[in-house]
């Protein structure tokens, strides 16, 4: 019985080591969002040239939507974009875009011209005010907003087909279910 | 020697921390600007993570610095400005973790471990020391009392050492 005390350091080491192991597998770039289950911030973006009415917070009420933060300077957005275009084609959920920190809003339009434009409404956030209100840490980020205009989920990094099928799509279906 | 040292120090001075705050960001009011700098030093840059936004050259850090200044100009107190940012990015942006239930382990952990270690060390040495003394005492039987002859020699030795010089 007394010998068991010699196991205590081993157990402490095992606990600390397992915490470190978990920590190793986690991406420190992923900052947990405090905005989940909070209403979307009030905002009104600038219009992009020849892209019609810009996105504002009032557009995010009434139905479940995706809000995607992108930028023509953002390399990971190029990887993500075909997935958004494919989702947009299915028409399963409206996707709105926030073009973040473009040096020239026309860059965003050229970028959408080259890579496809899956967005219902788009707006430009030149000085990060809206991005900061959304707690954005980098592009791309994608928010799931429910019909009441409440942020339900935030995906950091490119939306992959797996993320869409396994996370976003089921969540949207669940949010649409009348409660 | 100085010929070599002067250029070296010059280079070191040139490499001293460069401030990311651009002149065009600064507020005209020096009191507000000083407060903005102090607040900025408390806020983590969410892009570069181990820098505060006052030192970071990231564009988002710059935009956050401007938000901090806007809030100050709008009349916010320092803690209101910090709350504004925390409302959006969480406690994560605070370089000094707040003292609350979810961070008790962070604040008390090191002290608890130090106390545990001290207690463990005390137990360990006490457990070792006590049996050793006890063992030493009990292992040797008490020596037999001195014989008359030995007593005489001892007295002689003691007497000699009182100043009579080498007994041999």
Image: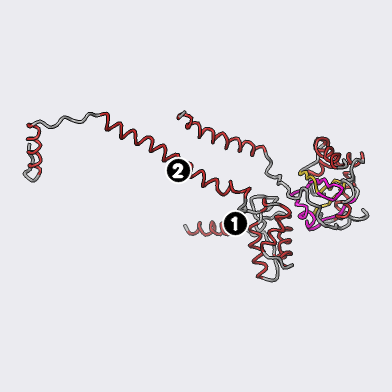
Residue at horizontal 35 percent and vertical 36 percent from the top: B129
Earlier in the chain: of badge 2 and badge 1, it is 1
* Res B15 label: 1
Write down the region rendered in magenta.
A121-150
| Chain of residue at mark 2 | B
In this view, A173 is above or below A56: above
x, y percent for residue A127: 79, 58
* SS category of the residue bearing label 1: loop
Check the image and name the residue furthest to the bottom: B29
Residue A155, given in percent of the width and then of the height, sits at 78, 43
Q: Is residue A127 magenta?
A: yes
The spot of residue B134 in percent (x, y) is 30, 33
Residue B62 image position (x, y, % from top left): 72, 58
Q: Residue at x 90, y 49 (%)?
A: A62
Furthest toward the front, the residue is A179
Q: Where is residue A45, by image quadrant? A: bottom right
Q: Residues within 10 Å of mark 1 (few under 14, many from 20)?
A: few
- Using the rendered view, name the quadrant where residue B73 is placed: bottom right
Please state which of residues A1 and B119 is positioned toward the viewer in this rendering: A1
Label placed on residue B138:
none
Q: Chain of mark 1?
A: B
For label 2, the residue is B118
Quadrant of the image for the C terminus of chain A? top right
In the rendered image, which quarter is residue A104 located in?
Answer: bottom right
Q: Which label sits in the foreground, 2 or 1?
A: 2
Q: Cα distance, mark 2 to mark 1?
A: 44 Å
The answer to whether marks 2 and 1 sit on the same chain is yes
**In the image: residue B45, left or right of residue A51:** left
């Amino acid at each position: 019985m007394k010998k068991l005390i010699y196991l205590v350091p081993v157990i402490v080491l095992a606990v600390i080591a397992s915490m470190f192991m978990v920590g190793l597998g986690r991406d420190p770039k992923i900052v947990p969002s405090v905005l989940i289950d909070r209403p979307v911030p009030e905002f009104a973006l600038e219009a992009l040239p020849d892209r019609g009415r810009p996105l504002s917070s009032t557009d995010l009420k009434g139905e479940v939507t995706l809000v995607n933060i992108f930028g023509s300077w953002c390399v990971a957005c190029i990887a993500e974009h075909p997935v958004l275009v494919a989702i947009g084609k299915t028409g399963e959920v409206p996707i709105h875009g926030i073009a973040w920190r473009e040096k020239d809003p026309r860059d965003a339009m050229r970028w959408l011209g080259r890579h496809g434009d899956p967005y219902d409404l788009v707006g430009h956030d030149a000085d990060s005010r809206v991005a900061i209100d959304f707690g954005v840490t980098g592009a791309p980020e994608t928010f799931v907003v429910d019909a009441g205009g409440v942020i339900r989920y935030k995906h950091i990094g490119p939306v992959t087909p797996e993320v869409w099928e396994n996370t976003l799509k089921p969540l949207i279906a669940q949010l649409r279910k009348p409660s | 020697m100085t010929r070599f040292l002067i250029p070296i120090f010059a280079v070191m001075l040139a490499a001293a921390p460069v401030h990311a705050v651009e002149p065009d960001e600064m507020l005209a009011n020096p009191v507000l600007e000083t407060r903005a700098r102090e607040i900025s030093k408390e806020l983590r840059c969410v892009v570069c993570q181990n820098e505060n936004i006052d030192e970071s050259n990231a564009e988002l850090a710059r935009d956050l610095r401007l938000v901090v200044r806007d809030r100050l100009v709008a009349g916010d107190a320092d803690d209101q400005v910090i709350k504004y940012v925390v409302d959006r990015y969480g406690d994560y942006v605070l370089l000094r973790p707040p003292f609350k239930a979810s961070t008790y382990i962070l604040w008390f952990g090191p002290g608890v471990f130090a106390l545990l270690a001290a207690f463990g060390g005390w137990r360990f040495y006490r457990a070792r020391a006590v049996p050793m003394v006890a063992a030493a005492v009990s292992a040797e039987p008490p020596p037999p009392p001195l014989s008359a002859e030995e007593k005489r020699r001892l007295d002689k030795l003691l007497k000699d050492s009182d100043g009579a010089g080498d007994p041999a």
